[in-house]
Image (cartoon, rainbow, N blue to C red):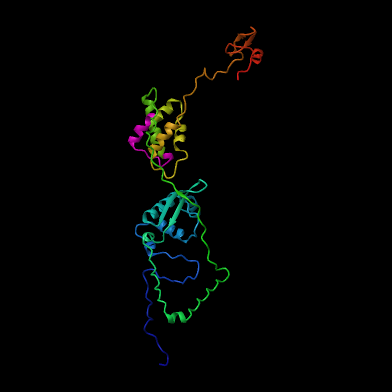
Amino acid sequence: MGTQQVTAPPCAQPVASGVIHANVRHSAGFTVVGNHLAQHRNLSLVAMGLALHIQSLPAGAKVAIKHLAGRFPESETRIAAALRELEAAGYLHRSRVRLADGRIVTRTVSFNQPGAETAAAPVAPRPRVARRTAASEAVPTPAPAPTPAPPPGCEPTVPERLPEAVLVPPPTARTAPPPPLPQPQAPTPELRRTATAVLADLRRHAPQLVLSAADIEVLTPGVATWLERDADPETVRHALTQDLPVPLKHPAKLLRHRITALLPPPLPGTHELAPVRPGAIVIPLQNCDRCDRAFRSRHPGHCRDCRADLPTVA
């Protein structure tokens, strides 16, 4: 009876079903981010993470697309899309500026709270000046206490002055009509069928070159002109798919431009490539108009000695 028996189990600890925060107060090396960004409902996770990274950078840091793509595992396409999201939400503003040396750069301004930059700055109240009285003139005003000098290493940093820049307007759309698409001289059903197959097969080699049936119908005569000029289908495919821009917005317009601008000339005939026989091109003989001496020239006139004796016209 002297042994104590435990018949009731210990109380179970409550189990939380959500996140548990184990917060530690930061004293240095931290960035303040508002919940309007961290809990934004219309931004993707890539855009929110990119905004957090940009807000943590010092002034003057590089935030170009290629620089960010080299820093993070995301591609240039995803980073460019995230930057556009932040611009639409008001967290970024990008503009093209011309520096004093003539270079055009992109200037990026990051806002930690969109819309706050347009609010009017609070006006500080003007201090009330007390009337001078005889008593106040008798009592001397104490001198203000000197401001203590900051300790070494804590001097305020003066922001580097940015070079003067001039805003550059965005490029305007081309108003001139594009050049006409090349047309084959002798269109045949076989030529048209091969050109249609080359255009429809482009998406196997470049997935971004997805063309509609209407686009293929319009571009078929141009590719048929390439094939008519003895261009191999593989050569046409390579010319249309190499070095594609990223991102590609208008595949049909790009293909139309390349078909027109890169069109090769017709192959020369066999008689044009025949070697020139020695003596085939003979310069005829001419008689000098002054001394009647024979000399070789394509045009009649004076020989070399008579041309040297002729007076120079001033």
Instruction: Identify the image quadrant of residue 220.
Output: top left
Please, what is the dominant secondary structure of the magenta stretch? helix
Q: Which residue is drawn at 46% across and 65% down?
A: 31
Point out residue 208 in the picture as x, y percentages from the top left corner: 40, 42
Q: Nearer the viewer, residue 96 or 166?
A: 166
Q: Which of 54 and 278 is in front in this view?
A: 54
Point out residue 213 in the picture as x, y percentages from the top left corner: 33, 36
Q: Residue lying furthest bottom in this view?
A: 2
Q: Which of 113 and 271 is in front in this view?
A: 113
Residue 206 belongs to the span the image colors magenta: yes
Instruction: Name above or below for residue 288 compared with residue 156.
Output: above
Instruction: Name above or below for residue 230 compared with residue 50.
Output: above
Q: Is residue 281 left or right of residue 46?
A: right
Residue range highlighted in magenta: 204-221
Point out residue 205 in the picture as x, y percentages from the top left corner: 44, 39
- The quadrant of the picture occupied by the N terminus is bottom left
- The quadrant of the picture occupied by the C terminus is top right
Q: Residue lying furthest front in this view?
A: 134
Residue 285 belongs to the span the image colors magenta: no
Q: Residue at x 39, y 85 (%)?
A: 6
Instruction: Name above or below for residue 37 compared with residue 275.
Output: below
Can residue 194 be seen here? no
Point out residue 102 in the picture as x, y percentages from the top left corner: 50, 45
Q: Residue at x 51, y 48 (%)?
A: 100
Q: In this view, does 125 lie to the left or right of 152?
A: left
Total numbered circles = 0
Q: Residue lying furthest top in this view?
A: 292
Can residue 14 be seen here? yes
Instruction: Name above or below for residue 127 compared with residue 307.
Output: below
